[in-house]
Amino acid sequence: MTNEQKKYVYSFTEGDGKARQLLGGKGANLCEMTQIGLNVPPGYTITTEACLSYLENDNTYPDGLMQEVREQMIALEKLTGKGFGDAHNPLLVSVRSGSAMSMPGMMDTILNLGMNSDTLQGEIEQTGDERFAYDAYRRFIQLFGKVALGIDDEYFDEPFEAIKKREGVKEDVGLSTDNLKEIATLFLEVVHAQTGRAFPEDPYEQLDLAIKAVLGSWSGKRAVDYRREFNITPDQANGTAVNICTMVFGNRGDDCATGVAFTRNPGTGENVFYGEYLVNAQGEDVVAGIRTPKPIAQMADEMPDLYRQLEELRSKLENHYSEIQDFEFTIEKGILYCLQTRNGKMNTQAMVRTSVELVEEGLITKDQALMRIAPESLEQMLFPRLDPNANVSALATGLPASPGAACGHVVFDADRAVALKKTSDKPLILLREETKPEDIHGFFVSEAILTSRGGKTSHAAVVARGMGKPCVAGADGIEVDVMARRAHIGEVVIKEGDIITLDGTSGNVYLGAVATVEAEFSDELKTLLSWADERAQLKVMANADIPEDAERALKYGAMGIGLCRTERMFNAADRLPIVLEMIVSDTLEQRQDALDKLLPIQRQDFIELFSTMSPRPVTVRLLDPPIHEFLPSENQLIDDLVQLKHLKDTMRGSEVLTATLSLLSGQNGTMTSIQQLADSSLVDEAIEKKEAILKKVRALFEVNPMLGHRGVRLGITFPEIYAMQIRAVLEAACECQKAGIEVHPEIMIPQVCTSEELRNIKVHVENIRLAVEEEQGIAPVFKFGSMMEVVRACMRAEQLAEEAEFFSFGTNDLTQATFSFSREDAENKFLPMYNEAGILQDNPFEVLDANGVGKIMELAVNWGRGVKPGMKIGICGEHGGHPASIGFCHSIGLTYVSCSGPRVPIARLAAAQAALQETA
Ligand code: ADP
Ligand code: MG
Ligand code: MG
């Protein structure tokens, strides 16, 4: 070994606990725990650099690696007083993978390495426990056979289950020493038959094969798929480390145990010790769901002294890491060992609760609490729950392993789930006896997971929690028959495709679809978001068109309404006929008539909105879409007319009448009954109305309606429409003010290109203001502003700022205009390919294009504020609820973002994080 040779191996006493990239998360934490004095069995870690070098060089070790490994083995022998391969006092180790990012169950661990026919005797000699030694032996042969030699599990499971059946035992612990001997012999034969050679006896050869298997697993299909699905990039985790750790045994009798625990409940975040253990078992048994483990609290009775030690370990871990820990432990002959720790994966509800409580306990700061949660994940808290009034009784009950309620069609295996998802979009629930890492693709396409075996820390539970999907585990009343695509629950048979509902919060499973209700805000979330608001510089508004939306937005903590689309108010069933009347009118008088009917309706809408939101601002956008959007399509009208004429010409059988009822009572607003229809003059009238609408539809035809007669263009050519809306806003403001309700309405003009357009509308605003003020005897409070969704408007921001008191970027239209993409065509035709080819990183309609669209926004902000310092400038539209886009909005100094109500909490947190990241 030369001096420059790279170091590839670190003992747990020397590795840097912070070096997660180099040592992997598991390795780094094993080092850290060792160095802070926790009882970790001695061992060492082979670095991820060794892994990368191995994979890059055609699966050959880097120079010196095995030399280092041998030195470490010798050191371990010294430390433990045992010998690797020693026939009297053998040293056994585990070989464990572990990369910088936790990838639960994605790569396999080999236990009891070093066992062979000699060391087996040594193990018996040392422990005086023949049964234990054979148990360890048969486990090793199977795991090594599977992981290092690539033999399918079923070759081992079959003879194993056969013997269990023959002996009439349910659990492994029921097997006798002779049974285990027989099994070991059978397993050795399996290896011989499957590999064509005898089981490797030389411990160093075993070690070599095991290390290679772990290193190779990094580029295996399972791991590659997992990284792709979770977007794990090389800068997050590159290569796996290999941890070699002295074996400790939880399966040496009733003073031995093994378990997995969380320092707090990862489902709720409650500060209670949470976990499971099995007496007389090896670690993997808990995770694999082979036996259903006991809740950790039971240990307080069963092994009180050890339980106290475990509690101590719990608090040491949490205090050291200032974070909820998920850890593995084993008790061998009354001695507690810690085998792994990592930050606990929790659902968002638990993340939020622990964030707040860790601050209250002084373990972290408020800022740390805010940075701890991914804004996007808050969506999980808006998970539906089962309707508490749904009076249903559970068909089966299991462990509440990951909260939330879901309803879907049962599917019994992952491949089938993926196949079904390809042909239909129906929600699926994956029902399995237990899940394994190779089922992962089934998780992705399912709404929820249900298993009949395993505990809260089983594979299914851990993975479902990570994905935020509901999971019920260990519902042992369910008997799954995968081959027949059926399950039995008592008398009930569930076939593939049958609908069930499960509640991961209670663990209940129901037959059929059970109603669900929206989630409520927890107090902790309110607290956390109030801290977010203290930190954030951006205000978060909601898009809301009707009072119900506004009320919901308030619940989500909206600081106002950033976009009220008045056209949505027109769409209600009682209004559309009047809107139609307005559109088809040929004269100003006719149009004014219709508008006069709309005015009180709009005014009432605004009064409700303003008072709901008082004293917060409400930005009202005047009519934006091309008016033909309110009309039926030309084809629809032609069809209707054909049918009406047919009706007129034929006998009026009641069938025909019923079929045409809807045509007549539709958008022309005529209320019809069968009797009335008998009167042919009504049919004539209907035909006349439809023809008038058809004529209008043809007259309004535009080649490119989104770039056509809409927004402010409409407001200028039909001033009476905007006049009605402006009047409705101002009258509503006056009425509220008179009632002592503080209001801040803002009138916002869409599609503006030039300052002249704004000036034109402003003249009307001014006239109406004067009139309203005189009529009402009170001056309405309001602001006047412009949408910024046209490139030219942004380029002329200085001139627009002279007229407008505020700007609001409409980034959907601005993105279309900047790219010259129409959204639908882009998303349906070429964007996916652009993304795949890396021509565009993201969909610019989802993630704001900071470099292009964002550049234009930045210019407009600076120009606008050059004229009006501190001018209120915001963004409305989908980007306003996207965390990365919010970060950008913060960086160019916007005043607010406005997004849909349910995204408001996400935006509040994202806004706080943007501010914190800047100061960091
Ligand atoms: P995973 O990443 O899948 O959790 P681990 O490497 O942690 O894999 O190991 C799988 C199981 O084996 C765990 O329950 C762990 O506690 C147990 N285990 C690993 N190494 C040892 C050891 N040296 N002694 C006893 N149990 C071990
Ligand atoms: Mg583990
Ligand atoms: Mg727009």
Image (spheres, rainbow, N blue to C red):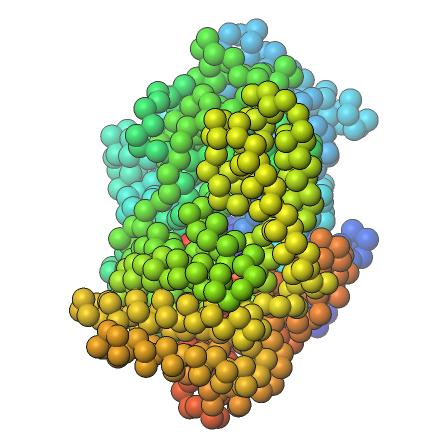
Position of 187 relative to 559 (above/below)? above
Q: Position of residue 124 (x, y in %)?
A: 52, 26
Report the side of 14 relative to 777 (left or right): right
Residue shown at the point (40%, 40%) measured from the top left: 384
Q: Is residue 739 visible?
A: yes
Residue shown at the point (76%, 58%) measured from the top left: 830
Q: Residue furthest bottom?
A: 867
Q: Position of residue 539 (x, y in %)?
A: 38, 71
In the picture, which quadrant includes the N terminus? bottom right
Looking at the image, which is closer to me, 862 or 771?
771
Residue shown at the point (56%, 41%) measured from the top left: 685
Report the side of 181 relative to 900 (left or right): right
Position of 711 relative to 84 (above/below)? below
Report the side of 85 relative to 314 (left or right): right
Res. 110 image quadrant? top right
Res. 858 image quadrant? bottom right
Looking at the rendered structure, the number of numbered marks drawn on it comes to 0
Residue shown at the point (60%, 57%) measured from the top left: 628
Looking at the image, which is closer to me, 248 or 139?
139
Res. 83 image quadrant? top right
Position of 803 relative to 178 (above/below)? below
Q: Is residue 19 visible?
A: no
Q: Position of residue 799 (x, y in %)?
A: 53, 90
In the picture, which quadrant includes the C terminus? bottom left
Q: Position of residue 59 (x, y in %)?
A: 78, 51
